[in-house]
Amino acid sequence: MITWIRRNLFRSITDSILTVVSASILGYVIFQVFQFVFITGRWEIIQVNLKILLVGRFPEELMYLVGFSILATCFSIASLASGMNRPIDKPPTLAGKLWELFQRFGLIIATSAFLIVLAGDLDAVLFGAYVVLSIFAGRLFGRARRTTPLKRLPGWLWVAINVTLPLVLIFLTMGQAALEEWGGFLINFYLAVVSIALSFPLGVMLALGRRSTLPLVRWLSTAYIELLRGAPLFVLLLLAGVALEFFIPASIAPDAIFRAVTVFTLFTAAYLAEVIRGGLQSIPKGQAEAGKALGLSTFKITFLITLPQALRNVIPAQIGQFISLFKDTTLAGVALSVLDLLNVGTAITKQDDYLGQGLIYESLAFVGLLFWVGSYVMSRESQRIEKKLGVGIR
Amino acid sequence: MSPQLSTPSKVPFFRDIRTLKWALQILALLAVFALFYWLYGNYQENVAKSSIQTDLRFLDNPANFTIPGNDLDQSQPVRDAFVEGFLNTLRVAFIGIALATILGTLIGIARLSKNFMVRTLGTVYVELVRNLPLLLLLTFMNLAVVLQAFPRIENAWLPLDLFVVSNRGIAIPWFIGSPAQLGIGILSAALLAFVVAKVRIRQADKSGKQDRAWLVGIVTFVVLVIVIWLLFGYGWELPYVDGRGTTGGLRLDPSFFALVASLVIYTSSHIAEIVRGSILAVSKGQGEAADAIALSGSQKMRLIILPQAFRIAMPALGNQYLNLIKNSSLGATISYFELTQIAQITVGNGSPAVPAFSLTLLVYLAISLVTSLVVNFFNRRLALVER
């Protein structure tokens, strides 16, 4: 212990000074945060507005749809995750397993518990229980894939079933309620999921196009990717906000969500294409040549040999793209006046009860917490997957 | 019996790979053309219905708005406002990139420190900032820090009596005199100092003696600047509170401060990760070799590790610079008068939206292209010359 302190904190005089300075900065910040969270913070503004922050003025009688799509998403993620290969370094004991679980999802669990306490009613507790149940059901379903006759299901069908289920529910939910009733964190979440789902096929096509041997296809894909990557997302959203109706038939009246999804999809596809192109470049030439030697067509070589490996290799980068899209959904709030979480967060401080009381810290802290936990857990998971895939280690 | 060689029958043209390739490309081109034709047709039809302008004539109309802290007149054409916005964007980009690089490099190094406390501080900073939306940071800086935590002008903070910090902005000491003259002076001083340093390096290379060439260069630069300063009789001017505002010095808009601060904080957390990764990617033997010839910690970092790390980091850094420039468009959300905000205002004042925003996009595209050209140039200069 003493040796550790001497080694890591007080190697030399400069080192000691650095230790003292950074320790005091860290201590000050921790003290301030602690004081703010537990003593000076006035959290009733969050408690009162919790529903608006999370789902906006979404109609009460349609909330079950939201609930179902969240449950379905949890189910699918759990089932897909348990269908993957076991981790190499499997913790042997129950305590080890629990510790791993805590490390991975402790933050999510704590945040959910915090939200349930804030909501403070029985429905929230019940919903939490349902979420846990659906995760267990998903795990069982995923395990059944390896032990029961489901084994014979082709892999793509398995993934397709798991991906379609929540997406169908999400699209269904989006169509149900009127736009002005949408709001809060729900909008950020849905915008991110829907846009990434739509941009994925486009991104794959663009990536293949950019590596195509046909010069015209290559130029067109490259031009699209570079144009979109050179443009700020915010200006694109503004442009879509005033100009999208000029480019589509007058019969489709675009609402703000439609505009946002269009821009996010087109924009993310360009970035996703670059990520996937990186994956394609990482596949050794021998793979495609082996395919040719077997007499496979170019189409089959791409979709059965190179593309699956490429996509697997860049899963972490794809998750990174998803994280930045998730964070960028806040731009839809300011550019298109969508009532997203950040917009609601600043708006509630202007309510009559709270106006001019300086509650912006509380509301922005809450908004930041939700975004931070989401992004942080996703990035941790992507690092874990990266390790498990062993990309770059072999 | 001689084996009958089958003469290869001629491949029909519709299975000929060359024809297929061309057919595919023409098909792709046609599809794209069809898409554009459809979009353009819709555009023409919708525009005819709503009778709006589609060209850039609006640039000659009077702007009808003023930019705070700028002598742009209301009657000046929109074009001048766009130029002013463009300059403001460049201002944010330059200062932001410089500060973010310095802060990011420091934090990236801190994250690899042997000192536990320093390492923890770096990790907390990066993990905290990287996972927050930039817009949240910007809103926080604007609403919570500048507009709420900063004091009113009556009881402004006066750190060291050099600065005036209030919710009307930050005033810093500034020189008196013509900026162009001083700029040229500093530039020529820098050039001269660079030449001196180069000559010293060449001599040191020849003689094999150790020579602190860069130190000499920096000293030359500082001395030259001081000489120019005294020669032309420049002076400092300190800002002070003057009733409802500040006089003297250079006043930075609150929105400018909020924008630059949040861009620097956000981008530096990404740059820190790039720097950290690049330092780790420098092969271990390099550091060990530096230890073996008994270089000090800072020498090892400065002379051996960082130059090689920056070679690796350059492309990723360039991407971050581009991101920062594009993200500066968020200044429009806090009424900082950069390009996007100007476009938004002119559109609000009746300029046609599609041409105005398209023009804005093109300008950003041009900035991005120039930046990536510069980055690529440095990248080639830094790249390892191999056989």
Image (tube, helix red, strand yellow):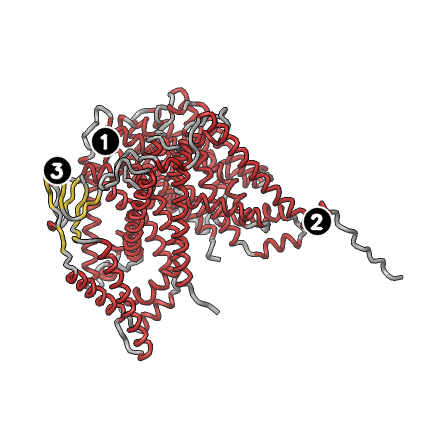
Report whether mark 1 lies on the same chain as mark 2.
Answer: no
Q: Residue at x 16, y 48 (%)?
A: B249
Element class at badge 1: loop
Q: Earlier in the sequence, mark 3 or mark 2?
A: 2
| Badge 3 amino acid | Arg
Instruction: Return the mark for residue A43.
Output: 1
The residue that label 3 is drawn on is B244
Q: Quadrant of the N terminus of chain B?
A: bottom right
User: Viewer-proximal residue, B94 or A112?
Assistant: B94
Q: Is residue B54 above or below residue A283?
A: above
Residue drawn at x 35%, y 64% as measured from the top left: B307
Residue extending farthest top: A61
Residue type indicated by callout 2 = Asp
> So how many labels did they put on this image?
3
How far across and down, in percent of the image, does residue A86 sit?
A: 48, 47
Q: Choose between B179 and A265: the one closer to the eye.
A: B179
Query: Circle 2 is placed at which residue position?
Result: B16
Q: Nearer the viewer, residue B74 or B211?
A: B74
Give the CA distance from mark 3 to mark 1.
Answer: 35 Å
Q: Secondary structure at mark 2?
A: loop
Label 2 marks a residue whose chain is B
Query: Residue A358 vs residue B30: left or right?
Result: left
- The chain ID associated with circle 3 is B
Give x and y (percent) for residue B347.
35, 33
Q: Dots 1 and 2: beta carbons under 8 Å?
A: no
Q: Is residue B123 left or right of residue A144?
A: left
Between the residue at mark 3 and the residue at mark 2, the CA separation in whole angstroms equals 81 Å
Q: Residues within 10 Å of mark 3 (few under 14, many from 20)?
A: few
